[in-house]
Amino acid sequence: MATGGPAPLCLSTTETMQQISESGRLMRWSTGWYGAVGHDRRPRGGRPIAGLEAAWTVDWPTGRVRTAGSGPLALAVIGDCGADDQQIGQALERVQAKDWRALTRWPGSYLVVARSGEALAVIGDLAGQHPVYWRAEGAGTWWSTSAGALAALDGAPVDPTALAAHLAFGQPDVLGRRSLFRTVNRVPTGDLLLITPEQATAEHYEPADTEPVHLRDAAPTVRAALTEAVAVRLDGRPVSADLAGLDSTTLACLAAKRGPVAAVTFADERLRDDDLVYAVRTAATVPNLQHHTVPGSAQTVYYAGLNDLSSLPLTDCPNAYVVTASIKRAVLDTITTQQTGGVHFTGTAGDAVLSAPSAYLSDLLRTRQHRRALQHAQAHARLRRTSAWTVLCRARRASRTDLAGAWRQLASVLRSAPREWVPQAQQPVAWTPLLATADWMSPDVRGQLANALDAASDRARAPRLLAAWADRQDLARVGADANGWREIALCGHGVDLAAPFLDNEVIRACLAVPADERGAPGRYKPLLGEAFTATGVIPDFVLSRVTKGGFNALAYAGLTQHAPVLADLLGASSRLAAAGLVNQTPVARVLTRAAAGQPTAQGALHLAVAAEVWLRQLEATDARSWWEVSARAAA
């Protein structure tokens, strides 16, 4: 792991932040030790995993930690997994054969820990809901689903270059195995952690490219995968679900096939969308959907509550949902007035797997499908009220390079002066888009980020097509964000968040369909329509819907209402500013434009606020929050 660059972010504890440590709940996580000699620590509140030596779960319900075997042949599955106990026992044959990918093919979202002789495999999921990290010590290796916990072993600081990459690119795998903390390694998307007496390393288990399946042929597989993904979570707990867009409505209807569902629609009148109209009609049509409306208020806007960070749970990386926490809590409050705890379904990631951005046009040009590229460009142009030539020009540059070449070009851009802000939709298509936050960083940080990109380009591993790379990165980003939302739901309301579109088998089924079929203009989410039309699960009027709600009105209202809080958060005392990751001048410009109702870099501000909150939360978290001295060491 690189050790050069800006000084690490060393954070000091403050009284306000200490309240988070005292009142907040650390997240669910798992960890373990592999070494020739014993360990001197164990996770605080950890429960040993049966059959595996020196491995624990923290805050996971007993029923969602299942094991088979012991000693040199052992398997543990942690999370929502559709395999029954017999199947998990039979899977020991796959463990013995070291057929690791076979252990990731069950419905649901879960972590796998498998031991075959001297080899230990720790396998996360394809969307980062169960991330895996490791750090080597002289006597062995610690692994964990929490990078923060591993950093807390010896107070390893935040890596400012890695945090800069998080802010500038929004693609988790750009810096590969480099985590947000120094000395802590991350397992990239589609890889597993393999530990042997010789080494600990990340190895591929998911192919970079998949065999394409035409949309019509894939539809039954997608329907089966989604049906199983929902069924896995229906284990007798109370069930609730968002009932808003096409994706969440699909999940609510699938759950309602098996029992009552408290369906909730956030219906702030400032949104001016038709989510509520469709929700009311759906609930009147589909049995078992008990509909509840969540009205908006002065506080259900973006950035509300950031003047009191003690109300936000600790997360392992910057949590995008701190910006919209008040909206999520309003929904959760409504749920908990109807039932206690339970599981709540959200359509998060439906956009990522059921459709595709127009960036796939670059792939059509790359593969010389010029006639199809022109046809699609003309259709996209009509939707955007522009010309087909403009659409194709945006796509051309990315069609003429690969990922490594794109990163070298991006490094060159970072070494030059910051750009004037242009909306992302007007910029050329890119393998890795450079976000506006990159232009808020100091020249030194930009230079270090460019150096890191150059180094990453030498070992870049990417699918052949840009759309496949972008799909994987979008899912990894959305998965990490969903973990933040999950902590808000669990910490404050005792509700488990379920995001089935992020399950391995749902991802595989959907992304096997080429992007130009999933994202073809003229039909909204055709894969979902093909999968569920005439099945009796989802009403036809839902499947024929072409509208989608948006939160822009609440974003601008929050920017205007809470501008002083944001200016203070990212002002003179900002941790990001101290590290050269944010310059106050462009931030002030964003707030001024937003207050005037002008278009602005909302996404960049969103990222910066989440990162600033996260850095301040870390100040309150020390090793005692995560670890305690093991009985062996005490003796």
Image: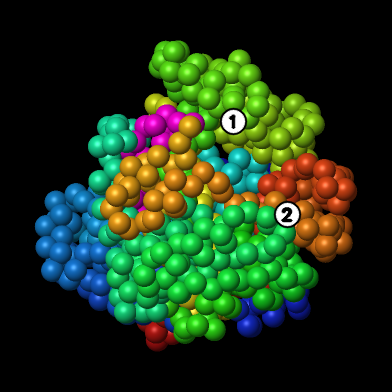
Please provide percent x and percent y for residue 398.
54, 22
The residue beneath circle 1 is 383
The three-letter code of the residue at mark 1 reads Leu
Judged left or right of residue 354, residue 7 is right
Q: Say if 191 sits above or below 263 in the image.
A: above
Please provide percent x and percent y for residue 502.
41, 54
What's drawn in magenta, residue-wise?
503-521
At horizontal 42% and vertical 71% (from top left) the residue drawn is 289
Please provide percent x and percent y for residue 524.
47, 40
Q: Nearer the viewer, residue 534 or 366?
A: 534
Instruction: Answer whether residue 527 is visible to the viewer in this image.
Output: yes
Nearer the viewer's eye, disc 1 or disc 2? 1
Query: Contact, CB < 8 Å: mark 1 with mark 2?
Result: no
Judged left or right of residue 606, residue 401 is left
Q: Secondary structure at mark 1?
A: helix
Q: Is residue 69 magenta?
A: no
Mark on residue 553? 2
Judged left or right of residue 259, residue 461 is right
The three-letter code of the residue at mark 2 reads Ala
Q: CA distance from mark 1 to mark 2?
A: 22 Å
The answer to which of marks 1 and 2 sits earlier in the sequence is 1
For the C terminus, the quadrant is bottom left
Q: Say if 151 sits above or below 290 in the image.
A: above
Which color scheme did the rendering employ for the protein?
rainbow
At horizontal 63% and vertical 25% (from top left) the residue drawn is 428
